[in-house]
Amino acid sequence: MPLETNTAAPPKTWDTTTTTPPSAPAPEPAPRPAPSGKRGWLGWLIAVLIIGGMAWAKMKYFPSPTAGEKGGGKGGAAGAKGGKGGGAGGPGAKVPVQVYVVAATRLSDQVAATGSIIADESVTIQSEISGKITSLNIQEGKPVRKGQLLFTINAADVQAQLQKQEYNIKLYQDQEKRQRTLLQKEYISQQEYEQSNNALLTARADLAALRVTLQKAYVRAPFDGILGLRNTSVGAYVSPGTAITTLSRVQPVKVDFNVPSRFAQSVRVGDPVLVTDEATTKKIEAKVYAINPQIDPVSRTLPVRAIYANKNMELRPGGFVKVNLELGETAEALQIPTEAVVPVASGYTVFTVKNGKAAIQPVNIGVRSDKVIQITKGLAVGDTIIRTGILSVKAGDRVSIQK
């Protein structure tokens, strides 16, 4: 068997005269240099901002359900399985509230107000003429009687003018007497006599004026009272209007206060007034003795004045007091807790319970205190109103009455 001999194929050659030899492979591009440090940090910052923005958008517009919502979902599912009741927080849930049943009660009509104490009489002692104080008989804080001399002003010039005028009057009297005799004998005319008589009358009028001026130099107490603190001393020169001291009558004292205009027709002279002194918290009883005929157009209140004997000096003028005015008593008044009344733009409302559901009922109010309010219109005896949980209740909500 002849042996086959494998001969290696000769290397392929290219005829450069007829065919173009293949080109050499393109060299690989050189790697880019790494970015500088500033540009690298800028890129990281942009990436962080983008990621943060996406996270914020997800939290704002696609929030994850909270544990309460999950529980509510479970409650809703349970409610769907259970029937009408629904789960906790579902649309069929009852709002827990506490209620009050309206009943007729006895009500003493009272108006609470604030007032101030004023003296029965009070005056600032002043001088009517200018001059130097020559004597001062003012004992500060001591009582004085009407007509008692308090101080005197130097009036030596007035006394001299008074004495001069007295001499003139004597002369004019003699002249008038002679002129009258001559007139009777028809030695002078009627006009001449009238001139002398007029001079006498004028002199007498001037004398009376000087006597009045002299009386002004002696200042006396105009009524019984207690002196205040004096503001001057002997020897001081004073002018008209200068305050020397004060004089006040504090037995009795007056209590000034205002009541709302809606009670204007209910206030009467002689109504009892319970006055509480802010300083001592002592309660005393005064009586209304004067009512202003006009309502104050600014505050829409009626000024009222009461009087109190103040025999033991319990009240001092200028003090602040609390006043409760008794306006009578109502036997069949409807009163409800203050927290049950809801003020609205059109007045007041309450929530009533009818057939297990809440309903809004407009009402009119009367006398009120810090605990109860009188209802004059809108409710009847036996009505059930909601007193707690009002902020959670809407009209038509089913309620669960809690004890």
Image (cartoon, helix red, strand yellow):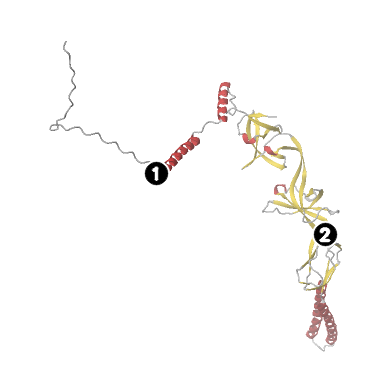
Horizontal side of 221 relative to 9 (left or right) equals right
Provide the secondary structure element on which disc 2 rests.
strand
Residue holding disc 2: 249
Residue 300 seen anywhere in this rendered image of the structure: yes
Residue holding disc 1: 36
Marks 2,1: beta carbons within 8 A? no
Q: Position of residue 149 (x, y in %)?
A: 85, 68
Which residue is at a point 74% across and 46% down the rendered structure image? 111
Q: Position of residue 90 (x, y in %)?
A: 58, 28
Under mark 1, the amino acid is Ser
Q: Position of residue 240 (x, y in %)?
A: 76, 70
The label shown at residue 164 is: none
CA neighbours of label 2 inside 10 A, class few (<14), some (14 to 19), many (20+): some
Under mark 2, the amino acid is Arg
Q: In this orientation, which residue lies closer to the viewer: 117 or 403?
A: 403
Q: In this orientation, which residue lies closer to the viewer: 223 or 246?
A: 246
Q: Earlier in the sequence, mark 2 or mark 1?
A: 1
Vertical placement of residue 313 versus 66, above or below = below
Q: Which quarter of the figure has residue 42?
A: top left
Residue furthest out toward the top: 1
Q: Position of residue 274 (x, y in %)?
A: 79, 47
Vertical placement of residue 326 versus 186, above or below = above
Horizontal side of 75 relative to 290 (left or right) equals left
Horizontal side of 304 relative to 90 (left or right) equals right
Residue 271 seen anywhere in this rendered image of the structure: no
Real-space CA distance between mark 2 and mark 1, rounded to the nearest whole angstrom: 98 Å
Q: In this orientation, which residue lies closer to the viewer: 109 or 80?
A: 80
Vertical placement of residue 126 versus 340, above or below = below
Q: Nearer the viewer, mark 2 or mark 1?
A: 1
Provide the secondary structure element on which disc 1 rests.
loop
